[in-house]
Image (cartoon, helix red, strand yellow):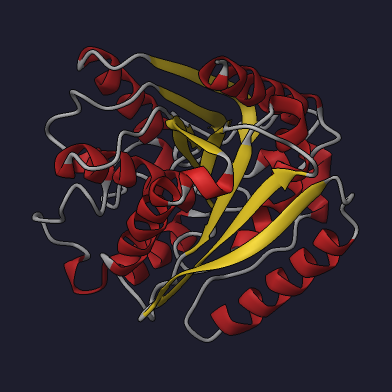
């Protein structure tokens, strides 16, 4: 029988993880606490990466934050990144620390999108925001110092689900040539029928939280058989023609099985795809930076990105 088996180094750390139950009533307080923590953390970042915010659209308002190494010249590769938060929480501040490290280390420009959140804005609103922001990035590549031939997309958790959906949408519309897709523990399947998604006691992101996130994002579509693949990428029939992909997920993550299946199907469709399943790693293990498994996760993602952005 499947069970949650944690990395031994992570198990004692679980006592420090705050327990929360997602609900409509609890959501405003959880959002506020998360945003306050992120703003405080961003204030302590080094100043060798310059962050500038830009308005992509005013109706609805969509913002992006561009991260660029101070004094960097020339056209650089770009990672267009989408934050996580179960489709209901989070902001592009979550990417500040990531790009403070990656921009100098990999010589890239980072672009983070502040998409609207569910349940106030259900599908397709958040995905439309991401597409508009990605299109803006391509259109303004010259002034941002970005090489348009090396713009890839990435995301974590719900952001990974949106990145996967964005890759599908870009392929289907044929307008934006995405160079790669970096999917970290992506939230891909609304049906919650896999063994891992039905486990009790999942740390950080429980099956109950997952249901709340999907209900919020899909709105009236939730529970129906005709949910579009651009909303839940695990439902897509044809994965051919997508850009090279990385999928990385923890063995103690409810998204484990849907992510493994998606990576397998990408490979079967002829899409160069790298898959890593880290035993005992929980959802959001990147937050436990002092652990061995979190450092390994970070190294795997960084090394894969380095290969993708090489000129």
Find residue 22 and report its horizontal and vertical position in percent.
53, 71
Q: Outermost residue, left direction? A: 226
Residue 10 vs 240, above or below: the answer is: below
Residue 90 seen in render:
no
Q: Is residue 59 visible?
A: yes
Q: Relative to 262, say whether 233 is above or below.
A: below
202 left or right, relative to 101 = left
Q: Total marks drawn?
A: 0
Left or right placement of residue 269 versus residue 138 in this view: left
Residue 195 falls in image quadrant? top left
Residue 227 location, quadrant: bottom left
Residue 216 in the image: state x and y as whole percent.
Answer: 36, 71
Residue 134 drawn at (x, y percent):
40, 51
Residue 92 screen position, x and y as percent:
60, 60
Q: Quadrant of the C terminus?
A: top right
Image quarter (top left, top right, bottom left or bottom right) of the N terminus? top left
Q: Residue at x 58, y 41 (%)?
A: 145
Residue pictured at 45% horizontal, 34% vertical? 152
> 227 or 12, which is in the foreground?
227
Is the residue 63 above or below the residue 225 in the image? below
Q: Is residue 190 left or right of residue 40?
A: left
State the residue at coordinates (22%, 50%).
Answer: 230
């Amino acid at each position: 029988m499947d069970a949650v088996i944690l990395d031994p180094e992570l198990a004692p750390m679980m006592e420090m993880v705050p327990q929360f139950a997602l609900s409509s009533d609890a959501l405003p307080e959880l959002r506020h606490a998360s945003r306050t923590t992120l703003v405080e953390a961003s204030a302590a970042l080094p100043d060798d990466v310059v962050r500038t915010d830009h308005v992509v659209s005013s109706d609805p308002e969509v913002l992006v934050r561009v991260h660029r190494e101070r004094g960097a010249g020339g056209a650089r590769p770009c990672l267009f990144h989408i934050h996580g938060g179960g489709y209901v929480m989070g902001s592009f501040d979550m990417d500040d620390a990531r790009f403070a490290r990656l921009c100098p280390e990999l010589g890239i420009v980072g672009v983070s999108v502040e998409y609207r959140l569910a349940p106030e804005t259900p599908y397709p609103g958040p995905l439309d925001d991401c597409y508009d922001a990605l299109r803006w990035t391509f259109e303004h590549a010259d002034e941002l110092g970005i090489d348009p031939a090396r713009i890839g997309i990435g995301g974590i958790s719900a952001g990974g689900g949106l990145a996967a959906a964005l890759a599908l949408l870009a392929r289907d519309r044929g307008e934006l040539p995405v160079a790669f897709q970096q999917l970290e523990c992506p939230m891909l399947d609304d049906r919650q029928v896999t063994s891992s998604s039905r486990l009790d006691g999942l740390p950080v992101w429980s099956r109950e939280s997952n249901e709340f996130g999907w209900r919020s994002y899909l709105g009236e579509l939730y529970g129906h058989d005709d949910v579009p693949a651009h909303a839940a990428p695990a439902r897509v029939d044809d994965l051919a023609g997508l850009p090279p992909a990385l999928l990385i997920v923890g063995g103690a993550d409810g998204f484990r099985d849907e992510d493994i299946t998606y990576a397998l199907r990408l490979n079967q469709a002829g899409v160069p795809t790298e898959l890593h399943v880290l035993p005992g790693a929980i959802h959001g293990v990147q937050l436990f930076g002092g652990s061995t498994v979190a450092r390994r996760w970070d190294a795997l993602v960084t090394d894969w990105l380095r290969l993708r952005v090489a000129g």
